[in-house]
Image (tube, rainbow, N blue to C red):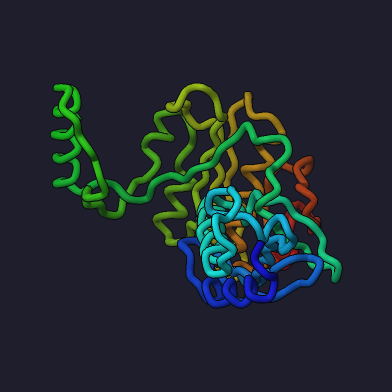
Amino acid sequence: MVGREEAFEELRRVVAAREFVFATVLEVTDGGPDGFLFRVRSGKRLHPHTVVVAADERSLAIDHSIGLPLDDDDARLWAYGVGTWLEEQLDTGALRWGRRLTLADGTVAIDPSLEPEPPSRWSLNTVPLERPTAEGQRRLRRLSRERRSRRIVILGDGIPHEPDPAPGGYVRGLAFDVRPGRRAHAEGRLIQWWLLNLNDASVDAPPVGQLVVAWLDGSETVAELAYLETKPSVAPDGLEQLVLAGVHAAADAGAEVIEHHLDIDHTQLGLPWQAEGDTRRLNAADVP
């Protein structure tokens, strides 16, 4: 087992101020019985998250990158393992889905090591806002022909892209209304265009819901859940995940206030929405 003091010093050296793809670690502190605490900013969020990593005997004896016991009591190796594990968690959305807990001082923190209960039936992705260039489309067609001829083809990341002036064609083909998303995109107000999918045996299962998150007209501080559409098969827990993703996208974009006029009063997610006429408003500081 690695000593706690040396583990903390190595962890702070390895992770403090580190910029991951979707978040930046602002500060690493020793929270005593609560464990090691990370203040993490996702995007332009005004109120950072707190992420906790246990600092007990079990945690200090594990290589967090693979979940197996450390081969050597090396504090530097332990810290690098935590950094690798933290990168994976942040890049797969733990700041949204991670289990919340309350620390001794009342701070609400995220412990990504606690799996959601029960495992979600739903997954989320976004409408692409770029499309292959003409040259890229020709290469894709050529690769497709080569694949049909049973040659081994690796697509790679070399397909050039350009902004799509009319995104969402695939969603439109599934009988979803893409006008709100396209309008927000064309006006430069779009924050995120979420798609909801039901996890099943089919990897090509089509989306069953969409949510457009955009800046309110003329505002740089107020975001709105602008348009929500789901298929009749979407259960309340799927709708909750879609709305929660929208709330987090707005907060990550730097919104101070999030509002909506949608008929989702039954979907509160434990968040303190305030009713003002037919508008529901949420202070972004209250998005844990």
Residue lying furthest front in this view? 72
- Image location of residue 77, percent across then percent down: 52, 64
Residue 118: in sight, yes or no? yes
- Name the residue: 66% across, 38% down: 239
Q: Quadrant of the N terminus?
A: bottom right
In terms of depth relative to the viewer, which is nearer, 166 or 240? 240
Left-right relation of 146 to 173 = left
80 lies above or below 271: below
In terms of depth relative to the viewer, which is nearer, 72 or 65? 72
- Name the residue: 46% across, 62% down: 21
45 lies above or below 85: below
- Image location of residue 196, percent across then percent down: 55, 37
- Name the residue: 60% across, 51% down: 69
Residue 217: in sight, yes or no? no
Quadrant of the rendered image containing residue 9: bottom right
- Image location of residue 288, percent across then percent down: 72, 60
Quadrant of the rendered image containing residue 50: bottom right
Q: How many marks?
A: 0
- Name the residue: 14% across, 46% down: 135
In terms of depth relative to the viewer, which is nearer, 200 or 170? 200
210 lies above or below 218: above
- Image location of residue 98, percent across then percent down: 67, 51
